[in-house]
């Protein structure tokens, strides 16, 4: 069995044989937010099942394919659906696609996710820039021997979510007359939603949002020096805030409702991030 670096490298080279594009930006599109990838032009679409060692998403609402194409002339590699720790994958499995991106020459990744809103100033459908995270997943993709070819043993996480990219997102949103909040994302293992007591705890430790993804991917990206922008869609207010149960159907419905706004935001941000990574 080759090591993860060698495997990621060979998969990256394989993917690059399928497209003339050489994207420096990757997108990871979360629950109900994968539609953007359908709008890419000159696209090569590769189901995860056709990519060796790629984990397969089992979650409803995740298409499970890699789309490499251009958005208004900017080449991007977009994951339409991701896998989660709660599906039984290890943190290394979950971050394998990020490792592959790194070996493909990706320099910036834009991650999106569905999240529960803890901060009471948010409402359902709100878009929130992730400023920082709290890893409560009980897992870290860097556990085990460190491969120095990826990065250092103890990567700094002080500026995990690139400040300049958050600034760009805010400026673009402002131009579109929309609002964009900023907050701290607590990453939990799932798959059960949180209890109201857990949400109260998360609020007290400084979380504004809660979800079951993103954290491991951000850690792996930062390990490789890939810059990160992450945006949550508040698909529901977190448990115990409203007097109603949480459901996956609600998460998907909200994703669908904000789809156009979300895609417009991505489209506005991309050229500016592209400039930063030298495209
Ligand atoms: N909790 C955890 N993950 C989520 C939620 C939530 O309320 N909504 C969407 N993903």
Image (tube, rainbow, N blue to C red):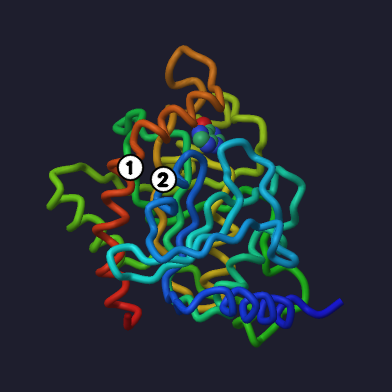
Label 2 CB less than 8 angstroms from ligand 1: no
Examine the image and state in which quarter residue 162 appears.
Answer: bottom left
Residue annotated with mark 1: 127
Residue at the location (40% across, 40% down)? 233
Image-based side of 79 in relation to 231, left or right: right
Q: What is the x, y in percent for residue 104? A: 55, 79
Q: Is residue 205 above or below residue 9?
A: above
Residue lying farthest to the front in this orientation: 42
Q: Is residue 87 above or below residue 55?
A: above
Residue at the location (58% across, 43% down)? 62
Residue at the location (13% across, 44% down)? 177
Quarter that holds the N terminus: bottom right
Q: What is the x, y in percent for residue 76? A: 42, 67
Q: Is residue 22 visible?
A: yes
Residue at the location (79% across, 79% down)? 3
Q: Earlier in the sequence, mark 2 or mark 1?
A: 1
Disc assigned to residue 85: none
Q: Is residue 34 above or below residue 90?
A: above
Q: What is the x, y in percent for residue 148? A: 66, 86
Query: Of helix, strand and loop, which one carries label 1?
Result: strand
3D distance between C-alphas at marks 2 and 1: 6 Å
Q: Nearer the viewer, residue 179 or 106?
A: 106
Q: What is the x, y in percent for residue 201? A: 53, 34
Disc assigned to residue 232: 2
Q: Is residue 227 above or below residue 147?
A: above
């Amino acid at each position: 069995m080759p090591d993860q670096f060698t495997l990621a490298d060979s998969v990256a080279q394989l993917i690059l044989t399928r497209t003339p594009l050489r994207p420096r930006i990757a997108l990871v599109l979360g629950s109900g937010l994968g539609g953007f990838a359908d709008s890419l032009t000159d696209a090569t679409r590769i189901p995860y099942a056709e990519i060796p060692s790629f984990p397969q998403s089992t979650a409803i609402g995740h298409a499970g394919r890699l789309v490499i194409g251009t958005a208004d002339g900017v080449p991007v590699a977009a994951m339409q659906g991701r896998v989660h720790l709660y599906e039984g994958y290890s943190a290394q499995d979950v971050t394998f696609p990020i490792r592959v991106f790194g070996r493909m020459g990706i320099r910036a990744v834009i991650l999106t996710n569905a999240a529960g809103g803890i901060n009471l100033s948010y409402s359902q459908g709100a878009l929130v820039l992730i400023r920082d995270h709290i890893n409560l997943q009980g897992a870290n993709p860097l556990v085990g021997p460190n491969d120095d070819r990826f990065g250092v043993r103890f990567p700094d996480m002080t500026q995990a979510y690139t400040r300049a990219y958050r600034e760009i997102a805010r400026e673009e949103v402002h131009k579109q007359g929309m609002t964009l909040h900023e907050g701290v994302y607590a990453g939990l293992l799932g798959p059960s939603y949180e209890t109201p007591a857990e949400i109260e705890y998360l609020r007290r430790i400084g979380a504004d949002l809660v979800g079951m993804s993103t954290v491991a991917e951000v850690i792996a990206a930062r390990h490789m020096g890939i810059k990160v922008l992450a945006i949550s869609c508040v698909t529901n207010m977190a448990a115990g805030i409203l007097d109603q149960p949480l459901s996956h159907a609600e998460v998907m419905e909200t994703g669908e409702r904000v789809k156009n706004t979300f895609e417009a935001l991505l489209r506005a941000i991309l050229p500016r991030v592209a400039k930063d990574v030298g495209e």
